[in-house]
Image (tube, rainbow, N blue to C red):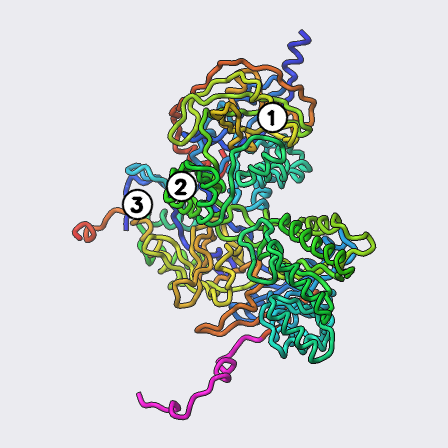
């Protein structure tokens, strides 16, 4: 009886979640919300924070209680703060989980102000966020003793020649934020350089191409160097946009050790995704560090590590014990689903900015 | 000057064209003018009304009105007049 | 119905709902109207001084300076600012900085004379730049100004003049170096990595004709990386310490130049500069930490000189203007023409300037390109901005224009406008008159045979 009463007394949290774009290159918002709804330590009232009227999560009323449009990160922090003040007045937010790369900077900068208002976040620090950038990866690897492919940020295609001499073709030509292409000779590399720099600006990152198998790890660091969660996954099917459409949890102690090392060395705070490659020399290399929850997070929940729940508890300053195990060999298979939506709902979110 | 008959305009200024599936938003004065057009008012009547309600002058409004009607036409919200059909 | 009862007119607008996924360069709305500067109504300023008009806030200049000064003086024992004349050399502006305690940093004979005329003591003028004539140098030597040597030809010329005049010029050398940023400014001064700088120091010391006062660097412009300054400061400190070891000569100062980014947003940047660009504290932390960690004896720390210009004045400057016309391009895109051209807003070439309306408006906006009034295709103020529905005659405020625009502006097909300074009591003063036809034509001369014609 006492147990039942206790269960009923679970506290209710108002949690704001972004990235409701559950589309073919999905944002993590919807799976994060599913995870929060399954949390054992609290009940939730989910406030969706959206940028566009067609983000599917806006219309998933069994998952999202209410959605508000927020201004694009490019409008600046003042505009965002103004909007969040309005939303907070109505919804009394306890926690916000931002899930887009492009918005993280603003939320990190605003985190103290938000805390003063009573809104908690659990994000990397600005130095952590900055040093794991693609163009800083070699320095990051050296500083923390982690394997990373050789790479160099360049500002002039002439530099490709000398780098290629060092790495040997093929090489990977990467943009500052997005885009990557594999070049097999100088002409190709130069043409990718021009294409990608026209879109994302300089620098361009030239990275050594490492042959091997791709793995991803999602996890959570407590900011003091402790690993709270870590789940490795091998992608089984990759869409033409490079997103995993199916994946399976794997048991590899070395990947977990590497994750522990990443967390303990950098004192990583918050959720993250490591993109790894197991090269032919049997070593793991870190290709990228994404400073947020990945879209496949529900797999981690399904195998026993509810990372969003743990993240919320850390944000609220509660004691969180590390997860110590997960089910190996469990898969996720993503599918798409057509909702039927009335035009009036689309009209309301479009015109009023809330639904 | 006539809106296509099946165009739906809501009070919030949301326009839906069922024939094409396109949606539009209007600002308040745009919504008011559409309503006047719907009632069958012609340009001079609308202009009189706007000048009475708003701080503007004939030249400004005429230019803005023509631009607005041009946008309505480009977006396929107006019936083509007999002359335009011939052309 | 009287006029006052009428609603504010806004042109009717219909906007197609573009359903899509978040787009990198999505809506950037600059929504808050700015109706006054330091309590002075913008409409009144335009009425009194014409349109367009540059307005500078003395309050903002002083408070920005104090912020910068505090960032450095709380971290380092001896700090001196020198006002970079080329950034904005209107006398009134220079004098605000001189009242705040700034020396003068000049890069030409013209600027040098301006500083002298402003009453700056020769000893407190830093003379930089690749082009100093023999006359300039003689004048600077006699005034005991600090001459920062840019190249070997200048070094030899100084030795020659010193011999002739039998005086010891007070000099420093400008050093360029790799600080990990691109582009590397290696066209000014002597290179650190290849030994040119050390070589120049040796030449100065061996000549015995000059007094080597300091070491100077200026690593770039609109720098977004404070760490680059830390690298630069430690390289200069290394040179200073080598110099002390070899010649037992201590430099009086380390001059870190300028280049701090202001709050403007560079074209192509995703997040606004106000959010991302480093603060004075960030720059100060990098520079002073590097100097404090260098091997100077604690009671022999060199004076730290800073020549930052842009970051001190950009925010204090506004350019007010008026909508001339609204048009629609053949593509259907909205075009707004303002009376502000790139000839007076040079910085529009590299910034997406923040632009806000100067009157209230509704939240309805439209994607707009803002063009200037010049009859030239390059005259674009903003290629893409989400603006409220402006009427002809409405006013707009361009923000963060205090740096370089009032020195690099061009007189082209029209006349340059007034510049107004609002003092700390909120009183506006004209600090530069607008040009008239007379200003321009008085410099012209027509040969006799061209004086008449028949059409």
Q: Disc 1, disc 2: CB below 8 Å?
A: no
Q: Is residue A320 above or below residue C372?
A: above
- Tell me which residue sits at (56%, 40%) in the image: A136
Residue at image mark 1:
A220
Q: Judge from the rendering whether residue C416 lies leftward or rightward of residue B22; answer left or right.
A: right
Q: CA distance from mark 1 to mark 3?
A: 53 Å
| Camera sees residue C56 | yes
Chain letter for the residue marked with disc 1 in the picture: A
Q: Inspect the magenta stretch and tell me whether residue C194 lies in it.
A: no
Q: Position of residue B73 (x, y in %)?
A: 29, 49
The image quadrant that residue A144 belongs to is: top right
Residue at image mark 2:
B14
Q: Position of residue C413 (x, y in %)?
A: 43, 73
The image quadrant that residue C112 belongs to is: bottom right
Residue situated furthest right in the rendering: C299
- Secondary structure state at the residue bearing disc 1: strand
At label 2, counting other C-alpha atoms closer than 10 Å, the crowd grade (few under 14, some 14-19, many 20 or more) is many
Q: What label sits on residue B77 in the rendered view?
A: 3
């Amino acid at each position: 009886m006492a147990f039942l009463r206790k269960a009923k007394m679970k506290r209710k949290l108002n949690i704001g979640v972004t990235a409701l774009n559950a589309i073919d290159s999905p944002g993590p918002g919807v799976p994060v919300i599913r995870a929060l709804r399954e949390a054992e330590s609290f009940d939730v009232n989910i406030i969706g924070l959206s940028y566009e009227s067609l983000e599917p999560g806006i219309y998933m009323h069994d998952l999202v209680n209410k959605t508000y449009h927020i201004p694009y990160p490019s409008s600046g922090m003042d505009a965002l703060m103004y909007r969040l003040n309005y939303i907070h007045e109505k919804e009394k937010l306890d926690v916000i989980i931002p899930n887009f790369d492009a918005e993280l900077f603003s939320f990190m900068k605003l985190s103290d102000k938000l805390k003063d208002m009573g809104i908690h976040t659990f994000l990397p620090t600005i130095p952590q966020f900055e040093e794991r950038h693609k163009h800083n990866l070699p320095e990051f690897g050296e500083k923390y003793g982690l394997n990373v492919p050789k790479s160099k940020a360049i500002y002039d295609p002439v530099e490709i020649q000398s780098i290629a001499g060092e790495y040997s073709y093929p090489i990977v030509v990467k943009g500052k934020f997005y885009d990557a292409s594999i070049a097999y000779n100088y002409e190709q590399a130069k043409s990718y350089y021009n294409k990608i720099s026209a879109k994302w600006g300089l620098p361009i990152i030239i990275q050594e191409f490492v042959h091997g198998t791709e793995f991803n790890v999602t996890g959570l660091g407590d900011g003091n160097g402790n690993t709270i969660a870590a789940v490795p996954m091998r992608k089984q099917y990759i869409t033409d946009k490079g997103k995993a459409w199916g994946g399976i949890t794997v048991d590899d102690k070395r990947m977990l050790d590497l994750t522990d090392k990443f967390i303990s060395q950098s004192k990583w705070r918050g959720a993250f995704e490591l993109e790894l490659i197991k090269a032919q020399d049997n070593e793991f290399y870190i290709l990228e560090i994404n400073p947020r929850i990945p879209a496949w997070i529900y797999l981690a929940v399904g195998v026993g590590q509810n990372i969003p729940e743990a993240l919320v508890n850390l944000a609220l300053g509660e004691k969180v014990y590390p997860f110590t195990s997960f089910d190996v060999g469990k898969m996720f298979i993503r599918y798409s689903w057509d909702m039927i939506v009335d035009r009036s709902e689309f009209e309301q979110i479009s015109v009023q900015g809330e639904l | 000057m006539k809106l296509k008959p099946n165009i739906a305009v809501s009070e919030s200024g949301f326009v839906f064209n069922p024939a094409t599936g396109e949606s539009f938003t209007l600002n308040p004065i745009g919504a008011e003018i559409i309503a006047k057009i719907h009632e069958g008012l012609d340009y001079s009547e609308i202009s009189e009304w706007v000048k009475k309600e708003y701080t503007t002058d004939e030249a400004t409004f005429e230019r803005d009105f023509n631009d607005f009607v041009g946008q309505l036409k480009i977006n396929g919200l107006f019936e083509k007049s007999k002359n335009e059909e011939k052309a | 119905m009287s006029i006052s009862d009428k609603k504010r007119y806004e042109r009717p607008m219909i906007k197609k709902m573009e359903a899509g996924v978040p787009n990198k360069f999505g809506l950037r709305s600059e929504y808050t109207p700015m109706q006054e500067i330091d309590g002075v109504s913008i409409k009144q300023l335009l009425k009194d001084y014409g349109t367009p008009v540059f307005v500078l806030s003395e309050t903002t200049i002083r408070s920005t300076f104090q912020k910068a000064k505090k960032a450095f003086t709380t971290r380092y024992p001896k700090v001196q600012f020198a006002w970079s004349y080329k950034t904005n050399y209107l006398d009134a502006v220079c004098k605000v900085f001189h009242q705040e305690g700034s020396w003068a940093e000049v890069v030409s004979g013209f600027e040098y004379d301006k500083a002298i005329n402003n009453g700056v003591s020769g000893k407190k003028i830093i003379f930089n730049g690749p082009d100093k004539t023999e006359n300039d140098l003689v004048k600077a030597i006699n005034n005991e100004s600090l001459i920062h040597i840019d190249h070997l030809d200048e070094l030899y010329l100084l030795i020659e003049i010193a011999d002739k005049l039998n005086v010891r010029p007070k000099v420093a050398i400008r050093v360029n170096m790799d600080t990990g940023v691109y582009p590397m400014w290696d066209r000014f001064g002597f290179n650190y990595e290849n030994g040119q700088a050390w070589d120049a120091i040796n030449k100065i010391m061996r000549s015995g004709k000059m007094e080597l006062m300091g070491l100077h660097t200026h690593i770039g412009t609109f720098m977004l990386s404070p760490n680059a300054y830390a690298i630069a400061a430690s390289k200069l400190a290394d040179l200073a310490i080598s110099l002390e070891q070899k010649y037992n000569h201590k430099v009086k100062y380390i001059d870190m130049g300028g280049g701090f980014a202001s709050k403007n947003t560079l074209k192509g940047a995703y997040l606004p500069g106000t959010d991302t660009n480093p603060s004075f504290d960030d720059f100060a932390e990098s520079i002073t930490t590097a100097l404090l960690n260098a091997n100077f004896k604690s009671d022999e720390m060199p004076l730290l000189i800073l020549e930052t210009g842009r970051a001190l004045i950009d925010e204090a400057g506004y350019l007010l203007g008026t909508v001339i016309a609204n048009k629609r391009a053949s593509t259907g895109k909205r075009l707004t023409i303002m009376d502000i051209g790139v000839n007076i807003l040079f910085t529009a070439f590299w910034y997406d300037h923040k632009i806000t309306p100067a009157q209230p408006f509704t939240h309805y906006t439209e994607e707009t390109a803002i063009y200037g009034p010049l009859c030239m295709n390059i005259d674009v103020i903003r290629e893409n901005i989400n603006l409220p529905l402006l009427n002809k005659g409405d006013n707009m405020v361009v923000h963060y224009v205090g740096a370089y625009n009032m020195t690099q502006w061009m007189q082209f097909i029209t006349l340059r406008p007034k510049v107004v300074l609002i003092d700390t009591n909120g009183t506006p003063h004209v600090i530069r008159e607008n040009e008239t036809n007379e200003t321009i034509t008085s410099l012209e001369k027509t040969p006799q045979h061209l004086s008449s014609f028949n059409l």
